[in-house]
Image: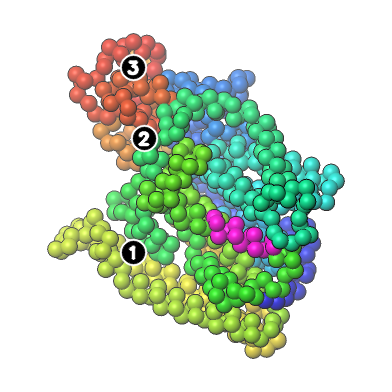
Amino acid sequence: MPHVPSRLTTRLSSPGLFLLLSGLFFLAVVALFGSDLLFRGEALAGGDIVNHYYPSKHLVREQLRAGEFPHWNPLTFSGRPLQADIQVGLFYLPNLLFWFFPLTWAFNIWTLLHFWLGAMGMTLWMRRRVNNLPAALFSGSLYIFSGYATTRLEPAIVLFIAAMAWLPWMLAAWDRLRDEWRFGGWGRFRWALALAGILTMSVLSGAPQITFFSFLALGIYALIHAWRTRDPEEEDETDSCFPVHPRPLLILAATVAVTVGLCAVQILPTGMLVAESWDRTTGAQWDYITDGSMRPRMLLTQIAPFFFGDPLDMQTYWGQEAGGYHEVTAYVGPAALFLLAAFILARFFVFRRTWLDDLDGPDRRRANRFEIFCLILLILAVLLAPGRHSPFFWIAYHIIPGMDRFRVPARFLLFFVFAVSALSGWTLDRLFGSAKPCPEPFNRRTLALSAVLLLLGGSTLVIFWRCVPLLYEFLESPLLIRQGATGQFARQIESLIRHASLSSLWFAIQWLLAGGLLTAALALNLRSTRWRFALPLAQWGLLIFLLADLISYGKHFTITTPADQFERIQYPRTARVDFLEDRLETRERFLWFDSLMSYQVDQFQTELLTNRPIRHDLPQMRGYDPLNSRRYGLFMNLLSARPLHENPRGFMILSDIPPDAFNWSLLRLWNCPIALSY
């Protein structure tokens, strides 16, 4: 299938110019996405920032200003390691923003910086595979502004965004290292150090699960490229007995070893902390690991992202019981799914034998391996994200080392987002990237493919839109009373169905617009050479269309607070705070029990929620950290008469119990000046 590069591509063949234009483009996109944070005086105020990250960053900064090394947190769980807490990220270079600048400003810039880094990394990695700038920008935009990243701004799990930003940089550095090693010289050592540095940044970013996924993807990528072919030019007689070339894998292993050495100052204490944790020492239990599995019905949110209601409205949303909406969505929009469908049909049916005919031997092999890599990630996401709903995850849990250390299997949707981002940009370039007329059979078949997808997909989505009420009944919405609902329930059901219908209708309209734009451009390009600008124009239009959809979707989940009122709103100095500070001086202690088990609805004393007392320098017996100490947890279970084998989770749960069941004598032995708040 011949592919003719556009005139624009020829002008952008300079790596420096490509880098400059891409960087400026994403600076503008990130500024648009974060306009409230940059220009309107707002500050990120989602759950984890307020309850966990902000207090810990404040504690580190105060200790540094006092001339102390921040190795210990004396305020949470009666004292716990601080340096060893990888989420604090004491040695992560971008975290320098937190140690020297106002925290609200630092969180804004830090988060937007990683959006920019993720988009740039994906764009640069795709540049080796596509000929057109908008195709590379399409992949970069989709990867970092997908629902997988932007919905995490609602619970403010921004560490995931930071870790996923380094994945495409890993792959790009590995590509350069593999090329340089083939040619020899000092360049190979420079790129080996560059890759080790990128891997170190991923480890230190503070999201071990996403780093684990990234290392897994890098290993698959390296293995695919090391696999032998029948091409005699690639064979090495010295290692011909192996099915793979061992040298690239040895290089990768050596680079990982260097990475371990570079971040040992974080890995060693974190490893000791993990060894003392409840569930992460020898592997967590099945029920704990699979908490947050993606239910199959959540696939509907790829078509209608608000099919189950507004995820921000906890009273009516009913899509995912465990994990939350942000854990089980990976919305990529209709434009990306249109291109993914076009790739599958074109690659395996329409152009099955001629798909890569325009590429020579080495380029064709690289393209084949790129597609295999993306398809493997796509399959892994489909098989593993359902967690307990998939037998394949059960197998992976028992076979793959490290799988029993991380919970919420739906986070494997990272592979889905990455694969769709890469394949959609690749398809946009292969099928719709030529600014000059290609051979007529190719253009006609591509036009027919696009038209079929446009009509078939559009009609299917319209049918889906009309069937939303039936789907609500089939899926048994908890608010739906089959014999008829009245009053408040009837209004809620009607509102939810209307919301789902509008969401699916909007997706159908976008599908028709995206497909219609590409189909019309192909038709014009086929008609006459005078319309050769139609396809490049359609690519840029599709890119803008994608960004408009994803940014408007992501902004819905960006929870903010006026920066100048952040402290007063999130950490108010209330009568409770003053009371505890006064009584703490006389070593009096006070304890609250949990009448509601979910912190999402237990908001009666927000100033004492989870780790917020750190902001008032109040030591407490409780708090929040996912790496909860097993010994401390056993003590809390003994204290509150809970079964010893039950994990008190990162909150050290103290549920409502009768006073006579509480171990008051054990509490008296805990003779330390602790404000037993929350």
Identified by mark 3, the residue type is Arg
Q: CA distance from mark 3 to mark 2?
A: 19 Å
Residue for point 40% across, 75% down? 460
For marks 1 and 3, the one nearer the N-term is 1
At horizontal 59% and vertical 80% (from top left) the residue drawn is 446
Task: Give the residues drawn in magenta, as a range.
Answer: 365-377
Q: Is residue 368 inside the magenta stretch?
A: yes
Q: Which residue is mark 3?
A: 589
Question: In front: 410, or 589?
Answer: 410
404 left or right, relative to 667: right
Q: Check disc 2 and report the residue beneath it.
A: 606
Contact flag, marks 1 and 3 (Cβ < 8 Å):
no
Type of the residue with mark 2: Thr
Q: Which residue is mark 1?
A: 499
**Residue 206 rendering spot, x and y as whole percentages:** 55, 37
**The C terminus appears in which quarter of the rendering?**
top left
Q: Is residue 75 visible?
A: yes
Which percent across, then down, holds residue 302? Answer: 43, 62
Q: Nearer the viewer, residue 522 or 401?
A: 401
Label 3: few (<14), some or many (≥20) within 10 Å?
some
Crowd around label 2: few <14 · some 14–19 · many ≥20 (10 Å): some
Label 3's element? loop
Identify the element where label 1 is drawn.
helix
Tag nearer the camera, 1 or 2: 1
Task: Work out whether mark 3 precedes mark 2 in sequence or the reverse, and give the earlier one.
Answer: 3
In the rendered structure, the answer to whether residue 492 lies left or right of residue 337 reads left
What amino acid type should be assigned to the residue bearing mark 1?
A: His
